[in-house]
Image (spheres, rainbow, N blue to C red):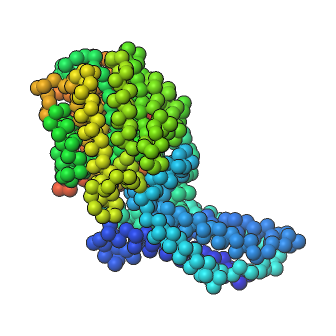
């Protein structure tokens, strides 16, 4: 009996060691982010993480424990020890793969591997693989091999694969089995009483990276999958429903409509250009790097720049919904993949089509990922121009035709259209893996400079596009809206919870802009969701159906912005911005750290009400 107990203990210790090694790999990989952390800070990541490591180990132990119990009560059932070895090594393979995948997920998204990562892989496998193209393949493969080989060798020395089942009376067997089952359940749950184990139990630092290092990757994935499979649960319930409704209504309450009209005509052509990953950090006028988007700087002098605009989320599937339907990101969910829900959303192209506009959608790739085709087809687009419309030599990577080809084809297409028209252009060249068939403007293989080079390429394509568009008779009657689909951690490696990552350009441009408004800057805080109300008001069209959109040109609309990531949100007011980690149930960012006034509490309260109401609305569709 005692030997069996030691066999279980050795199996448990083996996995604790494996998880410790995985945490070491994570901390070595992100050593730059951990700069300034003391030895004791790093030690705490292991001590506090032990709770989740033990829980993950208990999950892995469920199947061996069941096999042990069944074979113990049925002696004739001969279970060879080889299965135990195969099971252990199979789990080792998955733990290793998740450990390596987690490094790349965290690097790009700033969060541990979760349900969303697997949902993206399932919905758009080729696009998911293309997104990982900028990952260090050699390092990933070498680390995988080292962890697997090392784990196998350790298992042969530490685990008793040929353990024997003790011969004891049946009543005692039943008692032992019940004890082991209760013990395993208690370890998984983190105890038999009180609330179950969660991230906030193990969080200990004010630095997000230290808390993320504490989280067991496998436990986090299991926990996140279970949470997300429950569609009827709102993970952002902070306030009473009426209180949340009242706060959100207050944000959108305006005493009167705007009387500001920046266009020469109430019926212009409208073209929205959705710029892939075109973060404010590459726009000099927005405080970004100089020389990355020099042509965009010239466009700013001719248009109306909204210089305090933020993306709703951090991926294209969230950005396109925010831009076209004026609906905010739902953090852990993406409404575009829920067909019955997304079809209930309003959309700019549907409104314009119903008011006499011919509508079109341009993209260099295919739209059969993340349910994009269904969304586009059901929201007013009449013509779709996708990858099959381009010459094969114009298709440079898995994302399809390069931006130059897409923009050229758009001009050719618009030249044949009757006015007024609406066209939506989705660029893609500035997407991972940041590959070009032309020379890279910024030298070096560093990911930051590859990103700058693909952004520079997109900027040059925009310049060529507008040079040609300005020659066309329809240009003088056209409003362009240039906006990023989302921000990006590059080129400055911004944190997932920092407003800097979500700061994006929004520029109204084109021949339809009145001369007196060209070069004007609007500094009201806003987001992608505000494009719908702002544009439709300029066209004298109703926009009440876009309940989450405010007119950025109205002096009466309120100045605020909202963004979120997988399990947290940020809310911005003119004098204060905050970020909140839902998993840890705590504030993790404050724009003005010295501010201890009610303004910080106000921003946090509005943010909680906002995400609660967004998710409640998502569930109601």
Q: Nearer the viewer, residue 536 or 421?
A: 421
Q: Is residue 488 visible?
A: no
Q: Residue 619, position in %: x, y? A: 49, 35
Residue at 69% of width from left, 65% of height from top?
A: 63
Q: Residue 389 versus residue 393: which sits nearer the camera?
A: 393
Q: Quadrant of the N terminus?
A: bottom right
Q: Residue at x 54, y 49 (%)?
A: 125
Please say if 572 is above or below 132: above
| 390 sits left or right of 602 in the view | right
- What residue sits 39% from the left and 76% below the top? 43
Where residue 520 sits, quadrant-wise, is: top left
Q: Nearer the viewer, residue 213 or 139?
A: 139
Nearer to me, 482 or 114: 482
Residue visible at 60% across and 70% down in the picture: 92
Establish if 155 lies above or below 401. Answer: below
Percent coordinates x, y for residue 61 in the rendering: 65, 68
- The quarter of the picture where residue 474 lies is top left
In this rendering, does residue 157 appear at all? Answer: yes
Q: Is residue 13 above or below residue 526?
A: below
The spot of residue 303 in percent (x, y) is 18, 32
The residue lying furthest to the left in this view is 516
In this rendering, position of residue 530 left or right of residue 150: left
How many marks the image carries: the answer is 0
User: Is 391 left, or right, of 291 in this rendering?
Assistant: right
| Quadrant in the rendering for residue 55 | bottom right
Measured from the top left, where is residue 525 in percent x and y? 23, 38
In the image, residue 257 sits, relative to residue 619, either above or below, namely above
């Amino acid at each position: 009996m005692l030997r069996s107990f030691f066999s279980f203990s050795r199996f448990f210790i083996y996995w604790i060691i494996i998880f410790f090694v995985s945490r070491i790999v994570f901390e070595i990989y992100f050593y730059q982010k951990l700069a300034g952390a003391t030895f004791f800070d790093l030690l705490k990541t292991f001590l506090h993480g032990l709770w989740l490591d033990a829980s993950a180990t208990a999950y892995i132990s469920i199947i061996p424990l069941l096999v042990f119990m069944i074979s113990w009560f049925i002696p004739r059932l001969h279970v060879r020890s080889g299965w135990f070895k195969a099971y252990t090594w199979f789990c080792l393979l998955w733990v290793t793969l998740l450990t390596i995948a987690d490094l790349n997920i965290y690097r790009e998204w700033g969060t541990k591997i979760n349900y969303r990562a697997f949902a993206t892989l399932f919905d758009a496998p080729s696009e998911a693989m293309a997104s990982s193209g900028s990952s260090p393949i050699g390092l990933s493969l070498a680390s995988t091999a080292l962890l697997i080989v090392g784990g196998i060798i350790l298992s042969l020395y530490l685990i008793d694969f040929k353990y024997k089942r003790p011969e004891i009376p049946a009543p005692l067997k039943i008692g032992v089995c019940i004890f082991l089952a209760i013990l395993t359940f208690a370890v998984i749950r983190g105890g038999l009483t009180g609330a179950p184990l969660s991230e906030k139990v193990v969080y200990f630092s004010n630095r997000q990276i230290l808390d993320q290092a504490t989280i067991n990757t496998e436990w986090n994935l299991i926990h996140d999958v279970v949470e997300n499979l429950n569609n009827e649960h709102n993970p952002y319930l902070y306030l009473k429903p009426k209180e949340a409704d009242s706060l959100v209504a207050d944000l959108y309450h305006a005493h009167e409509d705007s009387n500001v009209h920046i266009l020469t005509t109430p019926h212009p052509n409208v073209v929205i250009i959705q710029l892939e990953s075109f973060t404010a950090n590459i726009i000099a006028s927005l405080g970004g790097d100089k020389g990355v988007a020099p042509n965009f700087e010239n466009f700013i002098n001719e248009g109306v720049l909204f210089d305090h605009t933020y993306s709703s989320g951090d991926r294209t599937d969230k950005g396109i919904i925010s831009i076209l339907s004026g609906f905010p990101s739902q953090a852990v969910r993406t409404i575009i993949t829920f067909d019955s829900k997304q079809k209930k959303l309003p959309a700019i192209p549907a409104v314009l089509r119903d008011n006499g506009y011919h509508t079109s959608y341009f993209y260099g790739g295919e739209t059969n990922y993340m349910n994009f085709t269904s969304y586009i087809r059901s929201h007013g687009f009449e013509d779709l121009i996708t990858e099959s419309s381009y010459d094969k030599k114009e298709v440079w990577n898995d994302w399809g035709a390069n931006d130059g080809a897409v923009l050229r084809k758009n001009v050719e297409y618009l030249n044949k259209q009757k006015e007024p028209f609406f066209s939506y252009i989705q660029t893609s060249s500035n997407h991972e893996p940041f590959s070009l068939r032309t020379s890279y403007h910024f030298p070096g293989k560093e990911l930051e400079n590859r990103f700058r080079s693909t952004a520079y390429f997109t900027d040059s394509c925009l310049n060529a596009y507008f040079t040609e568009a300005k020659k066309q008779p329809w240009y003088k009657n056209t409003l362009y809206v240039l906006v990023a689909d989302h921000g990006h951690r590059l080129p400055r490696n911004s944190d997932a919870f920092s407003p800097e990552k979500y700061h994006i350009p929004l520029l109204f441009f084109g021949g339809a802009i009145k001369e007196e408004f060209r070069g004007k800057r609007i500094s009201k805080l806003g987001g992608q969701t505000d494009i719908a109300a702002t544009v439709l008001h300029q066209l004298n069209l109703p926009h009440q159906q876009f309940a989450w959109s405010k007119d950025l040109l109205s002096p009466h609309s309120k100045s605020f912005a909202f963004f979120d990531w997988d399990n947290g949100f940020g809310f911005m007011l003119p004098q204060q911005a905050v970020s909140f980690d839902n998993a840890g149930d705590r504030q993790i960012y404050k724009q003005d750290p010295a501010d201890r006034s009610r303004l910080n509490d106000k921003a946090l309260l509005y943010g909680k009400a906002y995400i609660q109401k967004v998710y409640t609305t998502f569930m109601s569709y």
